[in-house]
Amino acid sequence: MRKWDVIDTLRRQHGLHSLAQILTPSTGRDMHGRPELARFGAVTTLMYAGEPIQRDIEDTRQLPTLDELIAWRRANPLEVELVFIDCWHSYDDSVRVLELALSMLPRGGFIVMHDCDPPDAEVAGPAPEHGGGEYWCGDSWRAFVDVTASLVGCEWFVVESDFGIGVITVAPPRRTLLKKRRIRRKKQAPEGHEAGWNWLVEHRSDVLHPMSIADWQRRATTP
């Protein structure tokens, strides 16, 4: 079970036609050319690159930074039914990209986010020294936990596969409330890598709502 399988299942289940994906060159390389994406009527790929990536990966300096991508979105309205996220896995990037994704779903829809359930403390460690290379889930899980806790009228869970595939069902606009101050100022997990990891291990079921592959497959085949 991979991230594109979850995306394709949501497309089939809900008759979705439009997809946007927010990626970096180091996290989203494997999404290019996926046949599952071609089944959408419209696909928009938003690629950005922060300083570590622009420094260490060739041919990325022409890409916008996250600040520039957010500014572009403000000037260019974009509405889609599903947003896939595989961002740079720092807390700040992950929160801001989740907020960006929510802004693209004014009529409801879905967000799928990769790397929400790191398998061990090492994979959930601090940012690597290089913009590419080793696998790293970082603090994406922290952002997923804080943002979902700050949404009213939405449902979420994390499929226990492929380093955690988070799915957020976004309610229609009148029922959805994003409390940005809570995301910024009231983080749920304690600071520090070891303390944060221990907190996640203890509270994982409550904050991630993990779903096994078998349960996801049953859900996917239920009319």
Image: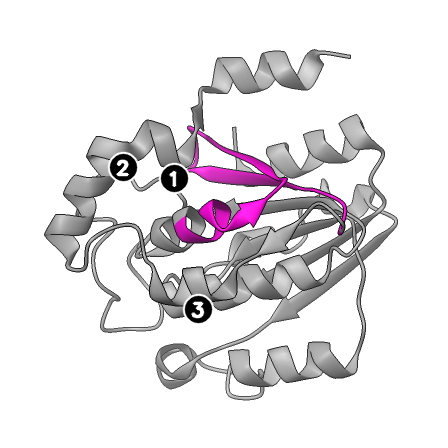
Q: Identify residue for label 3.
A: 93
Q: Report the disc number at residue 119.
A: 2
The part of the image, by quadrant, that contains residue 217 is top right
Question: Which residue occupies 20% across, 32% down?
Answer: 202
Question: Which residue is at 82% across, 45% downward?
Answer: 40
Say which of 213 and 148 sits in front: 148
What crowding class fits label 2: few (fewer than 14 Cα within 10 Å), some (14-19), or many (20 or more)?
some
Q: CA distance from mark 2 to mark 3?
A: 21 Å
Is residue 24 visible to us here? no
Label 1 residue SS = loop
Along the line of sight, which residue is nearer the eye, 35 or 124? 124
Precedes in sequence: disc 3 or disc 1: 3
**Left or right, 56 with reference to 120:** right
Measured in 3D between alpha carbons, the distance from the residue under mark 3 to the one under mark 1, in whole angstroms, is 18 Å
Q: Secondary structure at mark 2?
A: loop
Q: What colouring style does the render use? A: one colour
Q: Which region is colored magenta?
A: 146-173
**Tag 2–tag 1 contact (CB < 8 Å):** yes
Determine which residue is flagged by label 1. 163
Q: Is residue 99 magenta?
A: no
Quadrant occupied by the C terminus: top right
The residue located at (49%, 38%) in the rendering is 165
Three-letter code, disc 3: Asp
